[in-house]
Image: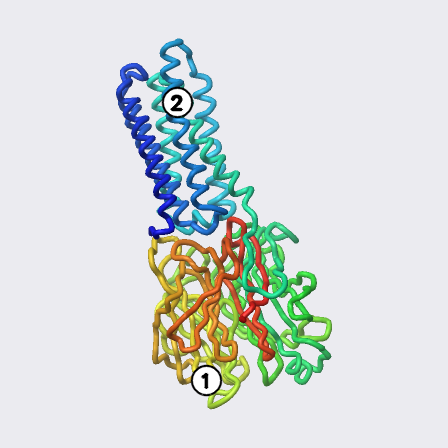
Amino acid sequence: MFDKKHAPQLAIFAVFVALLIAAAVLCGVYADICFDNVWTFVVTAIAFLVLAVAIFMFLIFNDGLFFSSTAMTGVFCTALAVLPIVGLIVTLFEVASGTDALISSIVLLVLGVAFLVYLIVKALIVDLFQPIALNTLNMIMLIAGCVFMLVAALVAILTKAYVLSTVISATLVLTMLAGTAWAKSQKYGKFHNIEGGPYLLFEGKTDGYSAYRIPSLIVMDKDILNEKCGTHFKDNVLLALVEGRKNSAHDVGVVDMLGKFSLDGGKTWGEQKIIFTFGNEVGKYGNPTVVLDKDTGLLNIVHMSATKATGFNYSTFNIRGKIKDDLTFEWEEPINISLPKDPSIKRGAADGVRADTLMVGPGKAVQIKSGKYDGRIIAPASNNGSSFVIYSDDHGLTWKRSEVAGSGNECEAAVLDNGEVVMVVRDGAGCCNYHPRQFQKLSYSKDGGETWYIKEKFTTLRTPICMASLYNAGGKLLLSYPDSFHTRVNLSVGETTDGETWTSRLIYGGAAGYSCMDGDKEGNVYVLAEIGKVNYSDAIGFAKIDLK
């Protein structure tokens, strides 16, 4: 959990604890003066300590989100430490002057309760506050610390230590305001190692959608499109697909598949288009996993869809479409490639995924373009904790399932220059659980994805348990990922030429989640990624990566 770089935060926290202990000792010395019941002091001390530890955990787990973690530690510790000490002075003054602060203590207690309820409902129920939600222990500690503070304030009122109650509630409200002010004032981070741009293609709370998630990027070769589809494109067609989530950032709700096109290498983008939708019905088109068939010119979008009426019991489809010059598609009938449904399975996870769900991607699929398996389309997939691929040798009409590549889910693949298939697999550990050290892992296949001679090879690239993307850029294997053990932050691209030694470059400094890379035969490489000010679901950004 702790690295050497966290030493300044730890030092500030140690000073804060020392100040807290000093204040507690003084309170203990004057306990018979300040309040009649010593348990008021005990409850107050425990409440302060729990809240302080929770805040410190938040600062460490989410290092990289702040303009300065050390400064933020100082801000929160100041809010926590100054008021108790001042409160002791005020309490002693109350004893000397006979002041009665009952009304102010009750008002601030009610305000603290209302503020806490609002934050819980807004952050965890209405819309996810991802940094906290990604660590269950931290979330519980923060809520528990706030509740303990309110209990301490109530105990102080019952023991007639009104000023002390006022100070406790004021401390809690000030701390929550400090966190809210930070969240409201936080700006987007900086992009690094890119050429031109960057571009915020989709930004939350715009165009009728609360949030955009799950990026899928494909560069469609103009030569293939013009030859196979009869189009007249002068440049490659870039298509950025996302899930448009109307109600919130949650995985289920009214979720459409949306797209934007670029005809100039990502310099400019067209208007947002609805690709697939259930209208206003509660339902989802999700996990877009795309590939352009070089032999037919058809775009294959492997995806999952479900509605509330079906209990969000996902079916998995491949739909093939022919693009036209006006950037619309002639879609064929969807091909259902779902696993057999098990009627004994009644409920899925929070995102609706069940043990009989064929979960694909997300991101992109790949096609082998030479050798024994020339033309094979490979879509990474998972089911019930196991990763594998589904593959088609007839241009996406029928599909077969490979052997298990390992544990995990949310996979993406690339084809190496020697014809091998390599797949990055998200670890199966829960992203909300504490996971101090997890690394990106790869699986390798020599037979077009049918079997895996290396099932789980760990790299030196960190992961906070998050989907990552692979792309073979002319012999350089690239992997885009959030570079952190603790939370989704700092979008980076790892690079290797031998599969053993990795270097990494920072692309976006700030909240960052899922990503998808693709490129063209001219050597251009692009990335579409979830980025944000505070939450990685704030926006979807696009950038051209500088590989020099």
- Point out the residue furthest to the bottom here: 372
Residue 338 in sight here: no
Disc 1 marks a residue whose amino acid type is: Gly
**174 or 88, nearer to the observer:** 88
**412 or 285, nearer to the observer:** 412
**38 or 336, nearer to the observer:** 38
Quadrant of the snapshot with the C terminus:
bottom right
Label 1 belongs to which residue? Answer: 419
Q: Is residue 346 above or below residue 59?
A: below
Other-residue count near label 2 (Cα within 10 Å), few / some / many at <14 / 14–19 / ≥20: many
Residue 111 in sight here: yes
Task: Residue 216: name its quadrant.
Answer: bottom right
Q: Is residue 409 above or below residue 251?
A: below
Question: Please, what secondary structure does the residue beneath circle 1 have?
Answer: loop
> Which one is earlier in the sequence, the residue at label 1 or at label 2?
2
Residue 255 is situated, as x and y percent measured from the top left of the image, at 56, 57
Label 2 belongs to which residue? Answer: 87
Question: Please, what secondary structure does the residue beneath circle 2 have?
Answer: helix
Q: Pointer 1 and pointer 2: residues touching (CB < 8 Å)?
A: no
Residue 354 is situated, as x and y percent measured from the top left of the image, at 41, 62
Residue 453 is situated, as x and y percent measured from the top left of the image, at 34, 80
Task: Point out which mark residue 37 bears.
Answer: none
> Marks 1 and 2, how far apart in space?
70 Å
- Mark 1 vs mark 2, foreground winner is 2
Q: Is residue 417 left or right of residue 442?
A: right
Other-residue count near label 1 (Cα within 10 Å), few / some / many at <14 / 14–19 / ≥20: some
Residue 331 is situated, as x and y percent measured from the top left of the image, at 64, 74
Q: Is residue 280 left or right of residue 377?
A: right
Disc 2 marks a residue whose amino acid type is: Gly
Q: Is residue 328 left or right of residue 122?
A: right
